[in-house]
Image: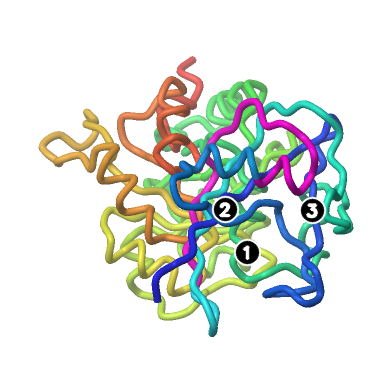
Amino acid sequence: MFPIHVAVGVILNSEGKILLSRRPENAHQGGLWEFPGGKVERREDLSQALRREIREELGIEVITHQPLISITHAYPDKCVRLDVHRILRYAGIPLGMEGQPIEWASVDELDNYAMPAADRPICNALKLPDTYLITGDDPIDPTSFLRRLTVSLESGIQLVQLRAPGLDENAYCRLAEQAYPLCQQFGAKMLINAPVEYLGKIEADGIHLTSKQLGMHQERPVSAEKWLAASCHNKTELEQAVAIGVDFCVLSPVLETTSHPGVEPIGWDRFTNLLSEINIPVYALGGMGREQIRQALNSGGQGIAAISALWDKA
């Protein structure tokens, strides 16, 4: 089934709320709420289609936009490929130009709206920041480690993977017990990088599976209330992540990295190609710095994941 190409816009107002519109009852997926957009017509590129559809539906002019996520979804009667862009700037006041109801919702309220299945991964992408901090070397001195974590959080980090493979279970749990309230203080989410059973002993927002752990699971190992992430290095692992219901993953190494000499990097073109068939947010890992965030976004990624570039050096 050849997919219908659809341009989709995520529009935010000055309060950070997101615009949703409701589909007509007699339309495909009628009565459900969606992010506005429509079919890319012949002889249109994505940007032209996005601007036209938003103008026709909402009466506003898109000025600048940025890729968010690409989703391919097969319904029983049709297949769609959604190219979703975040609208960075627009002119005018959005109105339901076709008589459709519209509402503004916060990111946390999106789960309250009945949406087409293809739109659900967009909600996860909107909940995630464009940087994912992986904590640095195992803490010989927990006080110093937590101080460095504080500096990173003060810089605006909103998503943290607590990685400390050199610690035994008791030491890791003690560290997590101190790190989690610190992350909460700054409004950041913390995922543990540890055996799944630790999640029953540690307060955390979710768990990050290593690629080895990922291969051991045939279904989602945690509840939907917890974030589930995974490390991937190839198409097979990405497909496994999707199959067990991972919320997001990291793909590496995208660029050459001193920590893994001799490992051939994926490169940005291959990164984009791999993501074209994956309907979940993916962070680029390996050789990443803040200067690569825009490249990662333009290549279809959620952003960057990094240790050294995001972890305080002091």
- Read off the residue under disc 3: 20
Q: CA distance from mark 3 to mark 1?
A: 39 Å
- Read off the residue under disc 1: 201
Decide which of 257, 304 is in the foreground and name it.
304
Q: Would you say the residues marked 3 and 1 are in contact, meaning their CB atoms lie under 8 Å apart? A: no
- Residue 181 locus on image (x, y percent): 73, 42
Predominant SS along the magenta part: strand
Give above or below for 91 relative to 283. Answer: above
Q: Would you say the residues marked 2 and 1 are in contact, meaning their CB atoms lie under 8 Å apart? A: yes
Q: CA distance from mark 2 to mark 1?
A: 8 Å
Residue mark closest to the camera, 2 vs 3: 3
Amino acid type, residue under disc 1 in the picture: Lys
Q: Secondary structure at mark 2?
A: helix
- Left or right relative to 156: residue 165: left
Q: Which residues are magenta?
A: 53-73
Q: Secondary structure at mark 3?
A: strand
Give above or below for 179 relative to 212. Answer: above
Amino acid type, residue under disc 3 in the picture: Leu
Residues packed near mark 3 inside 10 Å, few (<14), some (14 to 19) or many (20 plus) = many
Q: CA distance from mark 2 to mark 3?
A: 41 Å
Decide which of 181, 21 is in the foreground and name it.
21
Q: Secondary structure at mark 1?
A: loop
Q: Residue furthest front?
A: 43
Amino acid type, residue under disc 2 in the picture: Cys
User: Residue 72 colored magenta?
Assistant: yes
Residue at 58% x, 42% y is: 85
Decide which of 160, 17 is in the foreground and name it.
17
